[in-house]
Image (spheres, rainbow, N blue to C red):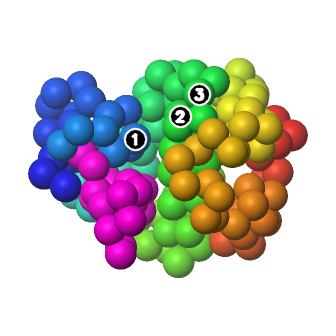
Amino acid sequence: MKGYFDEAVNNNEITAYLNGEGDYFAPEEGNMGYHSHIINFTGMLGYLEKQEHPYQLLVKYFRLYLSSLKEDPLDAWGLFNNLGCYYTLRKDNSYFLTQNEDLMDELTAEEKKKIGVLCRYLRDNFDKVPGSAQMFPIEKQMKIEIKYGCPYNLLTF
């Protein structure tokens, strides 16, 4: 990965950063050709942690990211992974994330609905995600995400 989150902010490329596009691509461990969402997500949190109001900025940037997504296998897959990163790091109280604050609670009903639409789309189109045949089935991955602290069934929004 060449691009850092401060560059994404300065260049208005938050979505590209969270999707791992272009210079923001971070190879997954083992270099299987997949983007590692956790590397970028922790990079974003490291940047935000140094800001005056990191949690409020996280909500702002996540909303911006969410607003750019469409019903597309890669967009839905990226959203699912970024939410998983958030809940995994929140569970451990990593960075400035705590159990007292939940990103989903900050979202509007319409934003939550979009998450539900995209997660259902992902469930129904998981076979279109590159490399999905080598991954756990999406239903199992969704159960794992709940295990790591997501208190919501993302399919029901």
Evaluate if marks 3 and 2 touch, with contact meaning CB atoms under 8 Å apart.
Answer: yes
Count the numbered circles shown. 3
Residue 19 is tagged as 1
Q: Secondary structure at mark 3?
A: loop
How far across and down, in percent of the image, does residue 103 sit?
58, 47
Identify which amino acid the numbered label 1 is placed on: Asn
Q: Secondary structure at mark 2?
A: helix
Q: In the rendered view of the protein, which quadrant contains the C terminus?
A: top right
Residue 148, position as x, y percentages in the image = 66, 71
Q: Amino acid at mark 2?
A: Asp
Picture quadrant of residue 71: top right
Judging from the image, what secondary structure is the residue with disc 1 in? helix
The residues colored magenta run 24-45
State the CA–CA distance, disc 3 to disc 1.
12 Å
- Marks 3 and 2 sit apart, C-alpha to C-alpha, by 5 Å
Q: Residues within 10 Å of mark 1 (few under 14, many from 20)?
A: many
Residue at horizontal 32 percent and vertical 34 percent from the top: 16
> Which is more toward the observer, 134 or 35?
134
Query: In which image quadrant can residue 115 be found?
Result: top right
Q: Position of residue 15 (x, y in %)?
A: 37, 32
Q: Is residue 45 left or right of residue 6?
A: right
The residue wearing badge 2 is: 75
Precedes in sequence: disc 3 or disc 1: 1
Determine whether 142 is above or below 95 in the image: above
Q: Are marks 1 and 2 in contact (CB under 8 Å)?
A: yes
Task: Please tell me how crowded label 2 is: few (under 14), some (14-19), or many (20+) other residues with Cα within 10 Å.
Answer: many
User: 66 above or below 90?
Assistant: above
Please tell me which residue is depicted at 71% across the width and 21% down the height of the picture. Answer: 110
* Residue 1 is one of the magenta-drawn residues: no
| Residue that badge 3 annotates | 72
The residue type indicated by label 3 comes to: Asp
Residue drawn at (61%, 64%), measured in percent from left and top? 134
